[in-house]
Amino acid sequence: MKNGEISVKKIKNKKDTAETSFEIRILRKKRNEHTQYWQTFLYSPKEENETVATALKALNDMEDLKDVEGHEAEPVIWENSCLQKKCGACAMVINGCPGLACDTRLSDLKKPVILEPLHKFPVAADLMVNREVMFQNLTVLEAWLNQQAAPAEGKNHDAHEASICLQCGCCLEVCPNYASDGSFFGMAAMVPASRVLIQMSEEEKSNLKDAYKKHIYEGCGKSLACQNICPAGINIQGLMARSNAAAVWKLFSRLRKKS
C-alpha cells in the first residue's frame, strides 16, 4: 500500500470516529457539596442501538476515566436497576427533556448529549436525586388499602393502567403546577391514588377523597404535559377523569343533596 493511500485511510478513520462518537456533557455534583459543575466525556458506541444508560455504564467501567480535556474523573453517580424500562430509577433530564436513560437511544439524540439530574428534586450527587417526597405524599394521602379488595366490575383495566406507574418523577419534572414544597402532589400521587379509589368501598373512601380534592384536584391545571412525557405511556387523562368523578363529583353531588 502506498503512503498516500495510508494517509487517506487514516483521515477517513478519524472522520468516521468523529461522526460516530458522542460528546456527553454531564452536570455533576459531589456528595455533601452544593456546587454543581459541567464535565464532558467522549464516548464511541460499539453497537447501533446503545442507550444513554449503556454509555454511562461504559464510562464508569473504564479503569482510567478522563474527560475531553484529559483530566482524571470520578465515576458518574446515577441510579439504575432493571435497565429494562420497568423501575424508573434511571430517570434524568436528557437534552432538556426528562426520560429514562435505559430507554433513550444515543442515535436519536442531537449532539452534544447533555445530561442533568431531575430539577424538581434535591440532588444527592451527579445525576442521582432524592425522590422521597413522592412517597411522603402518598403517606399524606393514605393511598393504601386496609383490607383485601378487588376492582369493581369493569374497572380491571383502570387498575392495571394505574399499576404500571414507575414512580420515576418525569411527570413532576414537566408539570407547571408542581413544586416539591407545594400542596399539589401531581400525577405521581394521582395515579397510585386512582388505583386505590377503584378498589375501595364507598365507606372507606372518605379520608382519601378529602385529601385527593386538596392535594390533586384543586392544584391540577390540566396541561397534560405529564401524559405526553410518561415513559410507561399511562393514559393519565382517562384515569384522572374517572378519579375526579369518584373522589370529587360524587362528593359534590352528595353535598348538594344534603343542602
Image: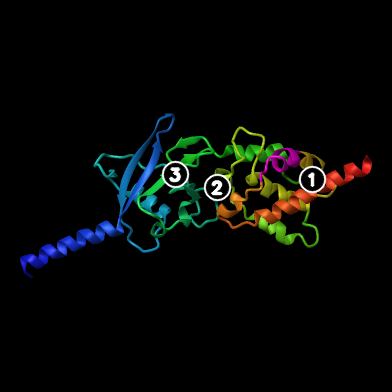
Q: Earlier in the sequence, mark 1 or mark 3?
A: 3
User: What secondary structure is the stretch in magenta mostly built from?
Assistant: helix
Q: Residue at x 71, y 47 (%)?
A: 193
Q: Which residues are magenta?
A: 211-221
Would you identify the image quadrant in which residue 19 lies? Answer: bottom left
User: Looking at the picture, how far across and down is residue 45, in whole percent?
Assistant: 33, 58
Mark 1 residue type = Val
Q: Nearer the viewer, residue 83 or 239?
A: 239
Mark 2 residue type = Cys
Left or right for 186, reference 147 = left
Q: How far is the residue under mark 1 from the one under mark 3?
A: 39 Å
Density class for disc 2 (Cα within 10 Å; few <14, some 14-19, many ≥20) is: many
User: Looking at the picture, how far across and down is residue 208, in whole percent?
Assistant: 77, 42
Left or right for 250, reference 180 = right
User: Looking at the picture, how far across and down is residue 42, in whole percent?
Assistant: 30, 50
What's the mark number on residue 170?
Answer: 2
Mark 3 residue type = Trp
